[in-house]
Amino acid sequence: MNESLIKLEGITKVFLTDEVETHALAGIHLDIRKGEYLSVAGPSGCGKSTLLSILGLLDTPSDGTYLLNDRPVQTLALAERARIRNREIGFIFQSFNLIGDLTVYENVELPLTYRGMAASERKQRVTEALEKVGMGHRAKHLPSQLSGGQQQRVAVARALAGHPAVLLADEPTGNLDSKNGEAVMDLLAELHRAGATILMVTHDARFARHADRTVHLFDGRIVDEQVASKN
Amino acid sequence: MLSDLRYALRQLAKSPGFTTVALLTLALCIGANVVIFAVVDAILLRPLPFPEADRLVIVTKDYPGAGISRADGSLPNYYDWRTGIPAFASVSAERNGSVIIGSGDAPSSVLCGRVSSEFFATLGIKPALGRFFTEEDTNKLGGNAVVLTDAYWRSHFNADPDILGRELRVDGQNAPIVGVLPRDFRYLSSRAQLYFPLASPVRERAVDRRHTGNTRVIARLAPGASLETAQAQIRALDARQLADDPVATQLQAAGYRASVSSLHADHVRSVRPTLVLLQAGALCLLLIGGVNLVNLLLVRASGRTREFAVRQALGAACRDVIREVLVETLLLSILGGTVGIVAGAFGVDLLSILGTNELPLGAQVTFDGRVAAVAWLGSLLVGAALAVPIIWFNLRQPVALALQSGSRGGTSGRAAQRLRQSFIVAQIALAFVLLAGAGLLGVSLHRVLAVSPGFQPEHVFAGRLSLPGNRYKDTTSRLDFEQRLLSELQAQPGVESVAATTAVPFTPEAVTNSSVVTVEGYAARPGDSIRAHRCFWINGDFGSTLGIPLRAGRWLEAADQSSRQRVCVVDEAFAQRYWPKGDAIGRRFTKDATFQEADNFTIVGVVGNVKTTELAETSPLGSIYFPYRYNANRTITIVVRTRLAPAAITSTLRKTVQRLDPELPVDDIRSMQGYIDDSLIQRRSSALLTSLFAAAALVLAAIGTYGVLSYAVAQRRREFGIRLAIGAQRHDVLRLVLGGGLRLVALGVALGLAGSFAMATVLNTLLFGVTAQDPGVFAGIALLLLAVTSIACLLPAFRATRVDPIEALRAE
């Protein structure tokens, strides 16, 4: 349980627009252990999404080191980053980001197709993931035929199907009502109990409480860290 | 890949409007290219259908000082070159003609070729049955052997395998059938059904007949020999022969030189610029359509930015994105291409309406596997090209940013907007070039049509007769028949006047019947030389029948056919050249390179200039009208001015001829206007086709401008809402959008103008009465383009003015 999965050392991110420098992240040091459930909280514009993009290899840091499974990944080539995203990382977005023209089944299958996985194995993985989130019966539906909560469940299934090392969730309840939001949080908690490593960005204190640990970001820096009591 | 294909199909089905527009655009543009490519391929690209056709050449002769270019060779040339030019593996001579086949009540006139003994061997053709001609055949006058084409053998002899040795009644004499040609044989554009040996009397092979120019000489280059080597050897031989040539001085003054050129290139030379222009026009249309599609696809891609960002977030590598986009654009191009190819196949059939059959090698224009394969390949290339900007668009933006901007309602970015705008500018520029080309060709055609041919072609019909040599052996018998026929025809009701001639204007014979003359007492100016002039040998009331105005003196009369005085009539161009002060009547000249006191003609009349090859002819060679008896050709054309309907005059002409000679068929009865119309086929077709392309380009440019501006307005709804909220008037917003659109149009027009100027050198060769930089045409095209695209800009601009500020701000 104490083995490090992600290690950020002095990560900075500077955006340059029209000769104006914006420091989105200013020296982030963060350790995430395997099986840990971490939440990142902070006000709008504090750098949460930038941090998540860097962790998800969607963006590169301006400086610092990012070790994933002890391997530095901050300077990898595009193709290798895509490969790691596909195999090691599962994304859960605030607005679900299901592809409207694909069925539930095809959406969950999508990341597996990029691996060149055999159809039979894909089918097994997709079925398994959909069953895990309780959406097996909706496999042939289109996202537009589902409620917001159901769409987010499908998005979770898509993130799980590839058996990633870490789940990155960006405000997963942001577009849901409280009831559906709670249901998704319960689902994440259940996955965590089963051993999944989760990093969740949220500004809702109620949901942050589900995590083992919460780090607070402000102006691109970690300004506070709280560990949940185990009782 | 299959899932990509399924997804692409689903995407296309989901947007029927986009898919329909895209498929129609592709079908239109690819279809137009298929049609033009089928013509270009058949005429310009495919080798002639003979073995090692690239070794086939033709020798032509130029006399620039005398105003003659690319003249045919002669029989003496043929005999000299077949032994004296080592670069030639074999040399052949060839002439066209017609013969009367059969006898009794149903004689028919059949087109034939008269060829030297090596003709078919030079082409690399072997007989399907029997043999071809021997040297002995070509030395024998009369009772000629005949070789049948496959079509004639099948239609007239039911493909009888025992045909050899049977005889065909040719011009009243029996000719033994010695061979049958292979089924697919066709010599260039010839419509000959029969072939005879090119038999010639010895006097026709004499030195003084070297420059008679009435025989095409073709050759097959020896293995490894080049055109240049052959040309150098011919010129060296010519230089040696000048030593004993009686007209050496005149030839040198005329700048005589022989040229060896590819038989294929020479045959299609006249249509090459037009076809290249049309193919360029069709490609330009394809480019405009492609740009339109790219813009539509970019707009669609903007709506799918987040989808591609999500795919990449889930692990799609660049190659996955490339594959997904490629599958979609290739699917679109294959579907659109298929519709275009099918439409193009029908279009190729419709081309005959425009007269493509009359073009050199035009009869070979067809839609076949090769054209289809090129069209498929082209469609795939179009699909791949369409994918490039879309792939760039999908990969250019950092995934993280794309995911965020998608969720936060961001725009598609300035770069994409600039790309779409630059495509609009390019599209308008290309449309301008096409419209300008079509406009110039249209004005040119209009100006050509306004040109008078120099005679009055209305109500004039011409029919051709070929008098059999065995029954009309000499001038007297031919003249006698002609006189009786003209008298009989003149007496027919509805016939106003009638004449006979060896050629009528706007026929190939009018060009080939040219000759140099030497005028008594005329001293050529320095640098000038003897000139060739068109020659017509006429009988009857030729001037009134064709409606050629008399300027001075008189026309030829019936008595001139028998008078001892050798007289002729010349046109104004001829008179002006030799007697600019206007005293041509009574002057004498010889139809030869030297003046002969015993063999000259006296001018008795000067008549108006007549166009002989096309209405656009600008520097007339000068024409001479001689009495028929001085060149009593067996092939004559009867010209009739009449108020009768075409069917009635055809019947009258045939019946009258039949009454006088039941074995004499009349063929090719046509109106003179028909001959003039045929001479305009290239101009008319190119003007019509480029106009169609230009109209399509204009529509595409308008749709493209509308599409991009509409999208830009939708993207800027919030901006317009803010502007209106802080006090902008509706007309301010209208001006903003319209101004932006019109700036793109103006830039496109400016670039199009520059492109049109660059095209000037290509176009100038095809224009008449208008230059390729005509400011009037360019201004008109610019106004048309501005008017149409302004309407396309106005619609989205009005939509922008109707934005509700509260709604727009709330929506964001």
Image: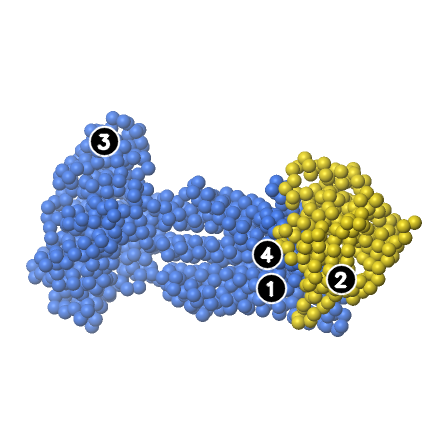
- Judged from this view, the residue extending furthest toward the right is A231
Residue that carries the numbered disc 2 in the rendered image: A28
Residue that carries the numbered disc 3 in the rendered image: B130
B542 sits left or right of B713 in the view: left
Let me know if residue B541 appears in the view.
no
Residue that carries the numbered disc 1 in the rendered image: B418
Who is closer to the viewer here, B348 or A5?
A: A5
- In terms of image quadrants, where is residue B394? bottom right
Disc 2 residue crowd, few under 14, some 14–19, many 20+, Cα 10 Å: some
Instruction: Determine the residue positioned at 60% across, 42% down.
Output: B1
Instruction: Determine the residue positioned at 73% across, 70% down.
Output: B723
Q: Are marks 2 and 1 on the same chain?
A: no
Three-letter amino acid code of the residue under disc 4: Trp
Label 3 or label 2, whichever lies nearer to me, is 2
Q: Secondary structure at mark 2?
A: strand
For chain B, give the colour. Answer: blue
Residue that carries the numbered disc 4 in the rendered image: B392
Label 2 or label 1, whichever lies nearer to me, is 2
Mark 3 or mark 4, which has the lower sequence index?
Answer: 3
A30 sits left or right of B346 in the view: right
Give the colouring mode of the picture.
Answer: by chain
- The relative height of residue A136 versus residue B683 in the rendered view (above or below) is above
Disc 4 residue crowd, few under 14, some 14–19, many 20+, Cα 10 Å: few
Disc 2: host chain: A
Disc 4: host chain: B
Spot occupied by residue B720 in the image (x, y as percentages of width and height): 71, 67
Disc 1 residue crowd, few under 14, some 14–19, many 20+, Cα 10 Å: few
